[in-house]
Image (cartoon, rainbow, N blue to C red):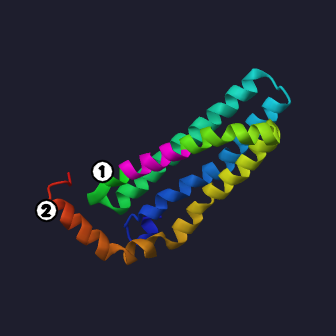
Amino acid sequence: MARRNNGIMQPEYRLWLFGLSVVLIPSGLVLWGVGAAHQVHWFGLVFAMGVIAFTNSLGLQLSVSYCIDSYRELSGEAIVTVILIRNSMSFGIGYGITLWVTNLGLQNAFVVASMVGLAQALTFLLMIKFGYRLRKASAGRYRAYAEQMMAAGLVH
C-alpha cells in the first residue's frame, strides 16, 4: 500500500490486519458459547479460548501500533490510554458476563457477545476511511499538546 502512496506509510495501512478479527472474534465466541452449552469435547473449548486470546492480543498490538504511528511524540500516553481502556473493558465484561449467562444461557449469551464483538471489530473500517482526516483535523491540538509535554520534560 505504501508503494501506491509514493513510498509513504500511513498508520491506517496497519488496520487492515483487523480483518482477521472480524472473522476470528465471532467464531471464537460462538464456538465457546455453543460448545459449552452443548458439551462438546474439551479440546473445542480450549481451541475457542485460544482463538479468543489470539484476537485479544492482536487487537491490543494493532491498537498500540496505530496510536504510536499516529501520535509518535505522545506514545507513552497513548499506550497508557489503550491499556486503561482494555482493562476497563475486561473488568466490565467479566463483571457483566455472569448476568448474561444466567439470564440468557451460555449459547445465547455468547452469540450476542459474538455480534457485539463483530460490531466492535468492524469499526476498523471507519478508521481506515476517516482516520487520516481525523489525524489531520487534530494536528494543531496534537502539536500544541506535544510541545507542552516536551517543555515539561514528559516526552521520551
Of mark 2 and mark 1, the one earlier in the sequence is: 1
Which residue is outermost to the right?
38
Residue 47 percent across, percent down from the top left: 68, 29
Crowd band around label 2 with a 10 angstrom C-alpha radius: few (<14), some (14–19), many (20+): few
Residue 88 percent across, percent down from the top left: 50, 46
Crowd band around label 1 with a 10 angstrom C-alpha radius: few (<14), some (14–19), many (20+): some
Residue 28 percent across, percent down from the top left: 70, 39
Up-down relation of residue 10 to residue 86 (above or below)? below
Q: Considering the numbered disc 2 on the image, is that residue within a helix, a strand or a loop?
A: helix
Up-down relation of residue 64 to residue 36 (above or below)? below
At 55% from the left and 58% from the top, the residue drawn is: 16
Tell me, yes or no, whether the two marked residues, 2 and 1, touch with CB atoms within 8 Å: no
| Three-letter amino acid code of the residue under disc 2 | Ala
Decide if residue 147 is on the left or right side of residue 51. left
Decide if residue 104 is on the left or right side of residue 81. right
Q: Separation of disc 2 and disc 1 at Cα?
A: 16 Å
Mark 2 — residue? Answer: 151
Magenta residue check for 76: no
Magenta residue check for 87: yes
Q: Considering the numbered disc 1 on the image, is that residue within a helix, a strand or a loop?
A: helix
Q: Residue 121 falls in which quadrant of the image?
A: bottom right
Which numbered marker is on residue 18? none
At 68% from the left and 26% from the top, the residue drawn is: 46
At 86% from the left and 30% from the top, the residue drawn is: 38
Provide the residue span drawn in magenta. 80-89
Q: Residue 30 falls in which quadrant of the image?
A: top right
Mark 1 — residue? Answer: 76
| Three-letter amino acid code of the residue under disc 1 | Gly
Q: Nearer the viewer, residue 122 or 99?
A: 99
* One can see residue 86 in this view: yes
